[in-house]
Amino acid sequence: MKTKLILIAIALGYISQVAAQDTKRFYVGTNPLSYGLTLPLQEDIKRYAPVLAGNEYGFSLAGACYFHPQIAMETRVAMGSLHQVASVNQLHAGIIVHPFLKNKGSELVRIYGGAFAKVWDYHNRLTDIHFYNLSPYAVIGYHCNFNNWMVDLRMNQTLAIVSWTNLENTKQGASAFFSPWPELIKILPTFTCTIGYRLGERYSK
Amino acid sequence: MKTYNYISPFFWRTMRREGVLILLLLIMLGGTSCQEEDLIVQSLYDVSGARLIYEDSQASKFINVVAVSMQVSYDKDENIDQLKRLCSRAVNEHPDTELILFGESILGWYIDEDEPENYQELIAEPIPGPAVDEIALVADSLNIYLAFGLTEKRNDTLFNSQILLNPNGEVEAVHRKINLTQDDLSNGIIAGPKTEDNVTLVTINGIRTGLIVCADVSGYWLTKQLVNKNVELILHSLASEVPEFVFDPVARQFNAWEVFANRFGSEGKRNYSGLTYIADPSGSIRSGASKSAIYMYHRIAVR
């Protein structure tokens, strides 16, 4: 609970910072699929659908600020139960860049790439043991805009992980990481769909 | 301050009108969970992370274990002979072996898809019974704990069980699988009871050792019972086609060492990976292999 409150505070703090900056554009949004993962689903869907939800479970919130016409800073939080035993709270932060902004009138302006880091706390509620992870990842995505609303479609690829835990007598570990199941799939990207609301001078009616 | 005056009225005007209600609704939805009560559906996020380093040099309790991945024959007698041979070989190569674990339903194929129930009737054994008695002689002569999975026939009912024999060749414990798969149901297997006497925990060398069979790992009730009893070692016999993960999520689920014994090779349309390992409570696989019929040895050290 304490961790959740801290994550919410960080997210809200960041969004208020965004609101207070001398910027003309920002957006807030949520990943609707993350909520679906808490619903009763067929076993295989429940097992693999998180790949399509960017591994975000339960409540999710994203906020971004364009501090340059082509560049935005984004942060995301998500918190929810994986299943009866474990819950995951996660915080992401990173930068996205629209490289084709000069191609006005083209669909290319909506494409972006980016670099993020995420930290997540995998909490085994039965044993009260936390497994913490810090991971850099790369993204490529596309913004669909509908007036003030937007849909952000994104592919994420984890690159490496540093892990540590409060389990006694256990030291941290780190490794390159492209898939949780490397013997079956060498590289396993995840996908995120965010529905957001765009705020700022450029979007005002 | 100028910026604040610009953004703030705009933010509140728009968010009040359209955004706040949606966000509140989603927050409420995010706090609910409608999962079936006893089924733990593990996802790929359960196996995402880097390998940790578990320090056990200060341990006070030890047990030398062997986990066997056996290529299983259709014929029960051949499997009994093979099991006996593998036990002798393991003890011959590692004379300090104290416990050997084999996979799930190791006296025959896991499933004969053409006639599943008839086949399970054919390989089923009572406990005690002729096959168990014969294998018990091995445990006695080698002076080891010996655990393996079998289809158990009890009062005309079939259970998917794991038996633990002690070094005197006596039945130390029997665990009947609680969380059945579709294959188990096709085999005519009945679920073991969710009762205290089917939460199978024995003490070996001072180590609290729990027995589970395959998909029992997906049972919340059984997981909770074993965790509440401070289980320190899980003997997990199973039949699995999946290859290896980066780390072992089961050890993390129970906060216990796990000995994971599988089977290898083709059985009809099924191809078993042979993935067999011994993992510490942080999930790090200390000794493991797959893609062959093999056995793994490790000295487990519990603090």
Image (spheres, coloured by chain):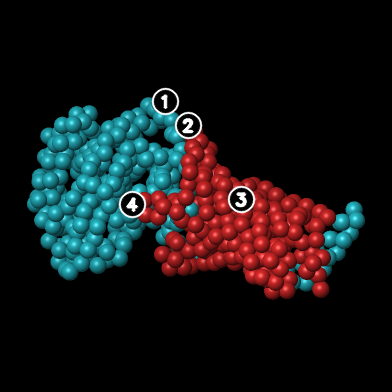
Chain colours: A red, B cyan
Cα–Cα span, label 4 and label 2? 28 Å
- Which residue is located at x 27 percent, y 32 percent? B64
**Residue B58 circle label:** 1
Q: Quadrant of the C terminus of chain A?
A: bottom right
Find residue B165 and report its horizontal and vertical position in percent: 20, 42
Q: Are marks 4 and 2 in contact (CB under 8 Å)?
A: no
- Amino acid type at mark 4: Pro
* Image side of residue A183 versus residue A189, left or right: left
In the picture of the structure, the residue carrying the numbered disc 3 is: A116
Find residue B72 and report its horizontal and vertical position in percent: 17, 52
In the picture of the structure, the residue carrying the numbered disc 2 is: A169
**Callout 1 environment at 10 Å: few (<14), some (14 to 19), or many (20+)?**
few
* Image side of residue B208 versus residue A63, left or right: left
In the picture of the structure, the residue carrying the numbered disc 4 is: B243
* Front-most of residues B209 and B240: B240
Q: Are marks 3 and 1 in contact (CB under 8 Å)?
A: no
Q: Are marks 1 and 2 in contact (CB under 8 Å)?
A: yes
- Which residue is located at x 34 percent, y 59 percent? B179
For marks 2 and 3, the one nearer the N-term is 3
- Residue B27 visible in this rendered orientation of the protein: no
